[in-house]
Amino acid sequence: MKAIRNFEEFIKERIVKKQSRDRSRAQFLVKESENSYHNLLEKIEKMGLPVVWIDHHDVPIKDYEKDFDNLYIYNPVRNKGKEKSSEPVTYLSYKISNRKEDIWLGIIGCIADHYLPDFADEFVERYPHLWGKNIKEPFDAYYGTEIGEVAIALNFGLKDSVSNVVKLQNFLISCNGPENVFEESSVNYFFRKKYQDIKKKYKALLGEARKSVEGNMLFFEYGGELSISADLANQLSHSYPEKYVIVAYKKGNIANLSLRGKNIKRILLKVIEQVGGTGGGHEHAVGAQLSVENLEKFKEAFRKEIENDKES
């Protein structure tokens, strides 16, 4: 087996070349993005359209509120006291539209976002063959039912090119129900192909990840072109509910992490203070980003924080 060659060798042989930072190009792209945003604002204003923002994340909105005169925000996280909640956007959208024919889409969005909605029984009455027995948690449905498979397939389909995602969107608009999703048709060919391609790679990664359990933590890192750490972390957390799950996707010198576990946000913020990086999210499901060279430090610091948390 040949040793892996040093990157500097490729530079000397002129196979690759170092590229200096193009600050002017970067500044141009930032300015172009700002111009596009303001152009969008002008067009919306001319058309007299309201801007409806449905969300369930606690994000700062003051900058956007000052830009729009007709901005309507529906976000239960912004409420106070007993009125504060965090239902998925799909749930809120379905409740607003109340289109019974779209109940399957409502269910798909909810279980994919780890939420079992109050209209689940209504869905089961309409599509009993797509549900299952002893569904107690949202991910029981996501990973163990026919409608869950549809949800996973659509999620994988969104990882395709923009043009194919638009085709998928148009296909879904024409769907009369969940049974149409996997029907063999030229309209959904690219979606079905993408789903099968990613499903094969995903299963292989999942199998490797399951070998990475160490005590009360599962730490798995991988690379390649497929960024799917959040999906892996979700399923691994469902399989190992008592463990802290960390999946790191490495690309270049950056690692994007998906973390799942009890009170994991609090632990993550402590670890970031020690080793650097950025991160945040929900109480039991978070994301983070740090340099690849700090991954091992992150892993050890996280392990220590878990032990400290257990003792306190």
Image: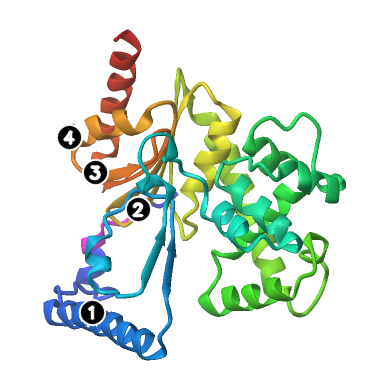
Q: CA distance from mark 3 to mark 2?
A: 18 Å
Foreground label between 4 and 2: 4
The residue lying at 38 percent from left, 84 percent from top is 44
Q: Is residue 107 above or below residue 284?
A: below
Q: Is residue 297 above or below residue 111?
A: above
Mark 4 and 3 residues: CB-CB less than 8 Å, in contact? no
Identify the secondary structure beneath mark 4.
Answer: helix
Dot 3: within a 10 Å radius of its alpha carbon, few (fewer than 14), some, or many (20 or more) residues? few
Q: Give the percent coordinates (x, y) of residue 199.
A: 65, 54
Foreground label between 3 and 2: 3
Q: Is residue 27 above or below residue 229?
A: below
Q: CA distance from mark 4 to mark 3?
A: 16 Å
The residue lying at 28 percent from left, 21 percent from top is 305
Closest to the observer: 300 or 36? 36
Image quadrant assignment for residue 302: top left
Please provide the residue range marked out in magenta.
3-8
Q: CA distance from mark 4 to mark 2?
A: 34 Å
Q: Give the percent coordinates (x, y) of residue 230.
A: 48, 47
The three-letter code of the residue at mark 2 reads Ile
Reading the image, the residue beneath label 1 is: 34
Overall secondary structure of the magenta section? loop
Which of pointers 1 and 4 lies earlier in the amino acid sequence? 1
Which label sits on residue 4? 2
Mark 3 and 2 residues: CB-CB less than 8 Å, in contact? no
Q: How many marks?
A: 4
Magenta highlight on residue 7: yes
The three-letter code of the residue at mark 4 reads Glu
The residue lying at 58 percent from left, 41 percent from top is 115
Q: By what rule are the colours in the image chosen?
A: rainbow
